[in-house]
Amino acid sequence: MGCRTFVKGSLYRWEHTCGKKNCRCAEGALHEHWVLSYYEKEGKLVKVYLTPEEVGALEKAVEAHREFKKTRARLAKKHAQLLPLINELENALAMPPPNRKKKEKG
């Protein structure tokens, strides 16, 4: 995976009716919008309507984030597998401290 920027969020096509009686969507030809949704730091869900020109680049950026998360999960799993082995190696290589008697006070 190369170094590239990404966008955290979900990209989807939203089809809906507007509710107007004489609109084409009342006959079944739904309105279509592309939406990027993501969560702000405060936990608030944000939805951004996209232009057709924005969709292509954002599809790649959202997919890049998905791949980043998969790679991060694989690395975390490997780390969890390696850490006990590293600790075992540390214990095996560690020398005991010099055995000296402590001086008594007094």
Image (tube, rainbow, N blue to C red):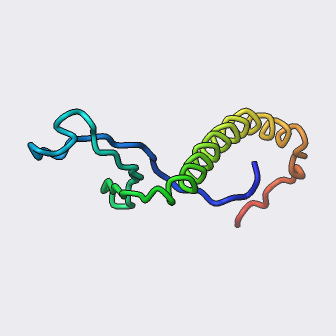
Front residue of this view, candidates 28 and 67:
28
Front residue of this view, candidates 41 and 56:
56
- Above or below residue 77? Residue 62 is below
Question: Which residue is drawn at the image coordinates 70% and 41% (left, top)?
Answer: 75
Side (left or right) of 42 relative to 80 = left
Residue 10 image offset from top left, x and y in percent: 45, 46
Residue 1 image offset from top left, x and y in percent: 75, 48
Question: Which residue is drawn at the image coordinates 27% and 39% (left, top)?
Answer: 30
- Residue at the left extreme? 21
Q: Quadrant of residue 51?
A: bottom left
Residue 59 image offset from top left, x and y in percent: 55, 49
Q: Quadrant of residue 89?
A: top right
Front residue of this view, candidates 103 and 10:
10
Question: Which residue is drawn at the image coordinates 27% and 37% (left, top)?
Answer: 29
- Residue at the bottom extreme? 106
Side (left or right) of 11 relative to 16 = right
- Above or below residue 34? Residue 89 is above
- Above or below residue 3? Residue 23 is above
Q: Quadrant of residue 106?
A: bottom right
Total number of numbered discs in the rendering: 0
